[in-house]
Image (cartoon, helix red, strand yellow):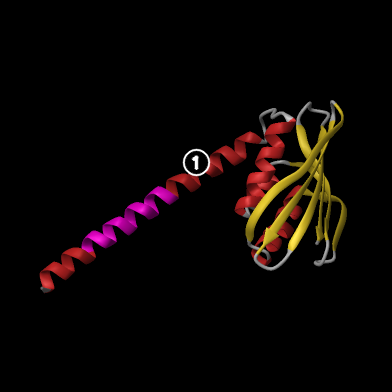
């Protein structure tokens, strides 16, 4: 009986170690892709897709990869209102936001273009604590990349 239980525990520990190994590999691959996609020229639809995924997963790192060097960031309820905020500081603020408001769901309500160089998106972010209306502007930069220039989260 003791031998059977120990073997079962060993098998269970192997399964846990294998899962940790797989999750670790996924995390490393994600970090490599996050650091490299900011250097690539993604189109406006790629950026809105990545932003949507970052809100669904609560990933400030993924979201920061889509931000311009400086952005306008407004988060209603947290009294966050910045003009020309460096993206690295925005990442810290967004990380805190996602920790306080873990994601339940995110979906786009509307997406439109003002021109070939500007897209706006409106989405609904539902967290465990509150719901937010997400408004963002994606602009073409001088380097011909599309990046998020404005991000506003209004409590619903």
Q: Position of residue 100 (x, y in %)?
A: 68, 67
- The quarter holding residue 148 reads top right
User: Quick check: 147 above or below 134?
Assistant: above
User: Residue 121, relative to residue 12: is it above or below?
Assistant: above
Residue for point 43% across, 50% down: 23
Q: What residue is disc 1 on?
A: 29
Of all residues shown, which one is farthest toward the bottom? 2
Q: Position of residue 30 (x, y in %)?
A: 53, 43
Name the residue: 39% across, 48% down.
Answer: 22
What quarter of the picture does the N terminus occupy?
bottom left
Camera-side residue of 105 and 6: 105
Q: Nearer the viewer, residue 76 or 83?
A: 76
Q: Quadrant of the C terminus?
A: bottom right
Secondary structure mostly taken by the magenta-highlighted segment of the chain: helix
Q: Nearer the viewer, residue 41 or 131?
A: 131
Instruction: Please report the bounds of the magenta region as a residue range.
Output: 10-23
* Residue 60 visible at all: no
How crowded is the residue under tag 1: few (<14 C-alpha within 10 Å), some, or many (20+)?
few
Taking the image as shown, residue 126 lies to the left or right of residue 2, namely right
Asked if 58 appears above or below 110 in the picture, the reply is: below
Residue 111 at x, y = what percent? 79, 38
Give the side of residue 75 with respect to residue 7, left or right. right
In x, y percent, where is residue 17? 33, 56
Q: Residue at x 63, y 51 (%)?
A: 56
- Magenta stretch: residue 9 in it? no
- Count of marks, rendered view: 1
Taking the spot 71% from the left edge, 39% from the top edge, the residue there is 48
Q: Which quadrant of the view contains residue 20?
A: bottom left
Task: Give the quarter of the image for residue 93.
Answer: bottom right
Magenta region includes residue 21: yes
Q: Secondary structure at mark 1?
A: helix
């Amino acid at each position: 009986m003791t031998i059977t239980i120990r073997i079962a525990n060993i098998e269970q520990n192997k399964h846990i170690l294998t899962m940790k190994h797989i999750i670790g590999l996924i995390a490393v691959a994600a970090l490599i892709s996050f650091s490299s996609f900011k250097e690539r020229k993604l189109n406006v639809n790629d950026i809105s897709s990545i932003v949507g995924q970052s809100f669904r997963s609560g990933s400030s790192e993924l979201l920061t990869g889509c931000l311009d060097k400086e952005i306008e960031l407004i988060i209603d309820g947290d009294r966050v209102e910045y003009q020309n905020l460096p993206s690295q500081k925005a990442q810290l603020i967004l990380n805190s936001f996602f920790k306080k408001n873990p994601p339940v769901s995110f979906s786009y309500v509307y997406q439109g273009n003002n021109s070939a160089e500007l897209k706006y998106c409106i989405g609904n972010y539902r967290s465990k604590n509150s719901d937010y209306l997400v408004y963002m502007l994606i602009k073409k930069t001088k380097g011909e990349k599309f990046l998020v220039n404005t991000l506003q989260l209004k409590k619903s």
